[in-house]
Amino acid sequence: MKNPTRKRILITGGAGFLGSHLCERLLTDGHDVLCVDNFFTGTKDNIVHLMGNPHFEMLRHDVTFPLYIEVDEIYNLACPASPIHYQFDPVQTTKTSVHGAINMLGLAKRIKAKIFQASTSEVYGDPKVHPQPEEYWGHVNPVGIRSCYDEGKRCAETLFFDYRRQHNLRIKVARIFNTYGPRMHPNDGRVVSNFIVQALKGEPITIYGDGKQTRSFCYVDDLVEGFIRLMNTADDFTGPVNLGNPGEFTIRELAEQVIALTGSKSKLVFKTLPSDDPMQRCPDIALAQEKLGWRPGVPLEKGLVKTIAYFESMLRDA
Ligand code: NAD
Ligand code: UDP
Ligand code: UDP
């Protein structure tokens, strides 16, 4: 007999870092999961352990093309997330954010599904307000090398709110701040994966600029819990809502922590800061605390230990 609480859930970008953890969590919660991915940055390795589950399905598909299926909920995560990947083909990045959002919103409209958007703290650009509350409109360069991602995600948010206003869609928009954990890409240039891989290989740790810029790092399990709580809020709550860990660290502090936890002999080296690199980023999560009763629980050190273990086994198997 069908489980009455079992939902059919589509996750675009489900073979990626965050998407694969979300697939896993929703299957554990007893749902049917359809993972849609074009494998641009995601891999089958991220979901291979789910393949034998009869409640899990995988479809190779690019969200810039229409998709006609029937589900109850949609999590729209498809989009390369790291600067190296999203700047590789910037036109495709904007198409994925914008055409992808239009197609998924069109789908949600036809089948009356609730739809979640993985937006980003990058919508705040290089912010002039710290920490950033959701009311802050941001400080974004429209013509820089990060713009394909930042403006693509901003336009996707606009589309979500216009589909809500025009077609009364049930939407949930999360603005995700830097997240880390197992299944991050080893070569995508993100600071946590770079530092861990460099430390484990005994290579120099590359600090861009003077290392005084700050970031806040959220462990993936905390973030996924936030996604699910947001999706389950009442229909009148749309977000946007910040999801991230408000603990703020300088990049230099992160490097020192990774060296200490790996016991590495790697030295710090200082390289040029990329253009448009924000000096400070920290979420204001008061809204998430109030509306979702959510705040991250995994401290940086504990999350780093789990992530280091993942990269250790990946390097051993390579
Ligand atoms: P990821 O690159 O691991 O995952 C993105 C997935 O989308 C990949 O599996 C990729 O193959 C797929 N994809 C890309 N273009 C596609 C297309 N046109 N059609 C179908 N699939 C496509 O990145 P992630 O870190 O898991 O990020 C997931 C989402 O969360 C992204 O939308 C990203 O912008 C957002 N986000 C992530 C972070 C973070 O810290 N990881 C921060 C802010 C926002
Ligand atoms: N779409 C889709 N699946 C659906 C319904 C729509 O992929 O089940 C796509 C289709 O490409 C369409 C887009 O979503 O162009 C936007 O749909 P909407 O109904 O908003 O507008 P339309 O372009 O159909 O007038
Ligand atoms: N960074 C660094 N060394 C690296 C990779 C990144 O110092 O090997 C810096 C980068 O310049 C930025 C911060 O770490 O200031 C976070 O970079 P990431 O690409 O992980 O995330 P984002 O800039 O999108 O927040």
Image (tube, helix red, strand yellow):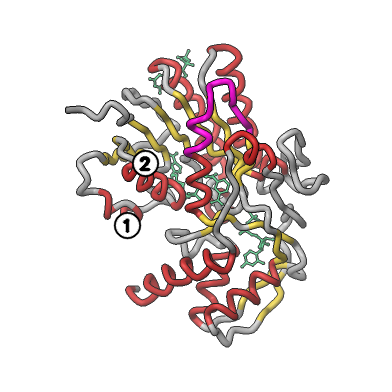
Res. 148 visible in picture = no
Q: Mark 1 = which residue? A: 45
Is 236 magenta? The answer is yes
- The magenta-colored residue range is 228-240
114 above or below 151? above
Mark 1 belongs to which amino acid?
Asp
290 above or below 190? above
Q: What secondary structure is found at the residue carrying circle 2?
A: helix
Q: 108 or 72: which is nearer to us?
A: 72
Residue 1 rendering spot, x and y as whole percentages:
17, 28
293 above or below 180? above
Query: Quadrant location of ligand 2?
Result: top left
Mark 2 belongs to which amino acid?
Leu
Q: Determine whether label 1 and label 2 are within 8 Å by CB.
A: no
Q: What secondary structure is found at the residue carrying circle 1?
A: helix
Q: Mark 2 = which residue? A: 26
| Residue drawn at (69%, 71%) of the image | 253
Prevailing secondary structure class for the magenta stretch in the rendered image = loop
| Residue drawn at (56%, 18%) of the image | 163
Total number of numbered discs in the rendering: 2
| Residue drawn at (50%, 70%) of the image | 305
Residue 306 rendering spot, x and y as whole percentages:
46, 67
